[in-house]
Image (cartoon, rainbow, N blue to C red):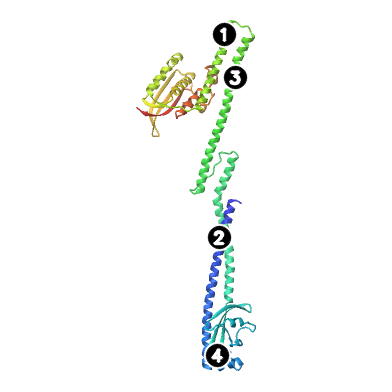
């Protein structure tokens, strides 16, 4: 059963039971109160009739009742002065006078009568309900049983009418209630149905599905949380998709990077083995084999570095920036002179936490990448600045090389990814240097930020927490 149907059925059962119970209580209370009033009125009528009987006994004497019992006197005139339907019975149970139908059985009332007590009971007479009050009227030696009857069938009819009207009201109320509850249930469950449809779409792979958010109730909050969850799922799926694609590219590029030097090594080795070559050609072939072997060795070492960085914890130590960059620039001075590249390094004084060997590798990779891009002037700067209430040391490496196309920037830290593959291979690049550098930056709690227009050089920034000095 659907949620809307459950809501309708549950609410209707509850309110139907409560409505019926309330109607039963009210109708029963009305009937009991009305009957109590009738009983009080019947007793008052009996007391009045008793007074009339006693007055006749006093004025006419006991012989008059004895004669009435023998049929000598007619006491119907006395009955006409009384209220309700009456009957007189002698002490032996014989009927002196009865206003009730001839077949009315009065012996039951006769047996229940007591001295100085008024008894009452309900009795069906000719398919009508009567309230009968019974008592003993005594004067001297004469005792007469007095029965007074009041027709209460109208009360039964009233109760039946009330029950019928209540039934009509009950059916109308239930019908209107079902309609109203259906409308309310529709508006309540509509957002849930939208959520259900959205979850189905997401389950089928449409991760961009979202639901409308309106209001501030719990269902709206659920819709908002669902949208945020869907966005998170979409991001994770995209990340997994990118990761899978990167792995595929990694395997393909790795196979390609192995294939080229291996082809050269096998070709030159086969040439040396099968042919008698002059000394110079042998040296040239051997040099190619050595060169490609060194390239494979460098590739394997960098892959090993990436693997180690992913599975090892490193301890960062605090160093002063002036001393650190003085040592780093001294280490690359010979390389810069050899390549004919001008290196400017200007940093502000601060204390930063680094793993020296890893940071040096990152620094050298950034410079090497700039040189391979054809840079003739590299500028290294370091400034202390505030970022989100945290003091940071921002290092920037800026070159005047060929630059990186903007659409390629987001992929340059992927392993084996090269913007210019032919140029990189000529310079023995494998596209791992920046991937290694970005991993080192992550170990230092940061990321590499690249900026380039694809023509006028590249700028790389790295932000590290620090304290001024």
Residue 412 percent across, percent down from the top left: 51, 25
In whole angstroms, how far apart are the C-alphas of marks 4 and 2?
62 Å
Residue 142: numbered disc:
4
**Closer to the observer: label 4 or label 2?**
4
| Apparent side of residue 77 relative to residue 385 in the rendered image (left or right) | right
Residue 259: numbered disc:
3
Q: Residues within 10 Å of mark 2 (few under 14, many from 20)?
A: some
In whole angstroms, how far apart are the C-alphas of marks 3 and 2?
80 Å
In whole angstroms, how far apart are the C-alphas of marks 2 and 1?
101 Å
For mark 2, what is the residue?
15
Does label 4 or label 2 sit earlier along the sequence?
Answer: 2
Please tell me in which quadrant of the rendered image residue 266 appears: top right
Q: Is residue 228 visible?
A: yes
Does label 4 or label 3 sit earlier along the sequence?
Answer: 4
Q: Secondary structure at mark 4?
A: strand
In whole angstroms, how far apart are the C-alphas of marks 1 and 3?
23 Å
Q: Residues within 10 Å of mark 1 (few under 14, many from 20)?
A: few
Does label 2 or label 1 sit earlier along the sequence?
Answer: 2
Q: Secondary structure at mark 3?
A: helix
Does label 3 or label 2 sit earlier along the sequence?
Answer: 2
Give above or below for 265 relative to 150.
Answer: above
In whole angstroms, how far apart are the C-alphas of marks 4 and 3?
140 Å
Question: Residues at badges 1 and 3 in contact (C-beta under 8 Å)?
Answer: no
Does label 1 or label 3 sit earlier along the sequence?
Answer: 3
Q: Is residue 448 visible?
A: no
Residue 217 percent across, percent down from the top left: 49, 49
Residue at image location 57% in from the left, 23% down from the top: 254
In whole angstroms, how far apart are the C-alphas of marks 4 and 1?
161 Å
Residue 283: numbered disc:
1
Q: Secondary structure at mark 1?
A: helix
């Amino acid at each position: 059963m659907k949620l809307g149907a459950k809501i309708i059925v549950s609410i209707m059962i509850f309110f139907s039971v409560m409505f019926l119970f309330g109607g039963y209580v009210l109708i029963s209370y009305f009937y009991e109160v009305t009957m109590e009033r009738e009983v009080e009125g019947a007793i008052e009528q009996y007391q009045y009739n008793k007074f009339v009987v006693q007055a006749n006994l006093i004025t006419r004497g006991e012989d008059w009742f004895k004669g009435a019992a023998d049929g000598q006197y007619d006491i119907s005139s006395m009955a006409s002065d009384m209220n309700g339907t009456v009957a007189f019975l002698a002490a032996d149970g014989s009927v002196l006078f009865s206003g009730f139908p001839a077949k009315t059985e009065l012996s039951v009332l006769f047996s229940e009568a007591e001295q100085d007590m008024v008894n009452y009971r309900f009795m069906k007479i000719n398919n009508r309900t009567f309230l009968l009050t019974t008592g003993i009227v005594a004067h001297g030696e004469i005792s007469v049983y007095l029965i007074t009857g009041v027709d209460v069938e109208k009360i039964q009819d009233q109760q039946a009418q009330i029950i019928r009207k209540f039934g009509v009201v009950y059916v109308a109320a239930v019908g209107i209630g079902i309609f109203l509850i259906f409308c309310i249930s529709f508006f309540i469950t509509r957002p849930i149905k939208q959520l259900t449809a959205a979850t189905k779409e997401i389950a089928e792979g449409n991760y961009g599905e979202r639901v409308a958010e309106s209001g501030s109730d719990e269902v709206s909050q659920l819709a908002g949380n669902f949208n945020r969850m869907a966005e998170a799922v979409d991001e994770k799926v995209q990340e997994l998709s990118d990761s899978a694609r990167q792995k595929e590219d990694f395997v393909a590029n790795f196979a390609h990077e192995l294939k080229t030097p291996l082809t050269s090594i096998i070709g030159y080795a086969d040439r040396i083995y099968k042919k008698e070559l002059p000394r110079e050609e042998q040296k040239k072939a051997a040099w190619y084999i050595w060169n490609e072997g060194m390239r494979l060795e460098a590739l394997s070492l960098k892959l090993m570095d990436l693997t180690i960085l992913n599975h090892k914890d490193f301890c960062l130590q605090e160093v002063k920036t002036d001393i650190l960059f003085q040592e780093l620039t001294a280490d690359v001075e010979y390389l810069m002179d050899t390549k004919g590249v001008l290196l400017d390094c200007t940093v502000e004084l601060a204390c930063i936490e680094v793993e020296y060997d890893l940071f040096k590798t990152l620094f050298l990779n950034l410079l090497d990448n700039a040189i391979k891009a054809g840079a003739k002037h590299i500028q290294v700067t370091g400034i202390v600045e505030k970022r989100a209430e945290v003091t940071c040391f921002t290092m920037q490496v800026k070159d005047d090389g060929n630059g990186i196309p903007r659409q390629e920037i987001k992929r340059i830290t992927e392993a084996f990814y090269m913007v210019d593959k032919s140029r990189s291979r000529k310079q023995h690049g494998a596209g791992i240097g920046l991937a290694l550098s970005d991993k080192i930056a992550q170990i230092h709690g940061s990321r590499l930020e690249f900026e380039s227009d694809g023509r006028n050089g590249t700028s790389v920034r790295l932000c590290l927490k620090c304290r001024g000095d």
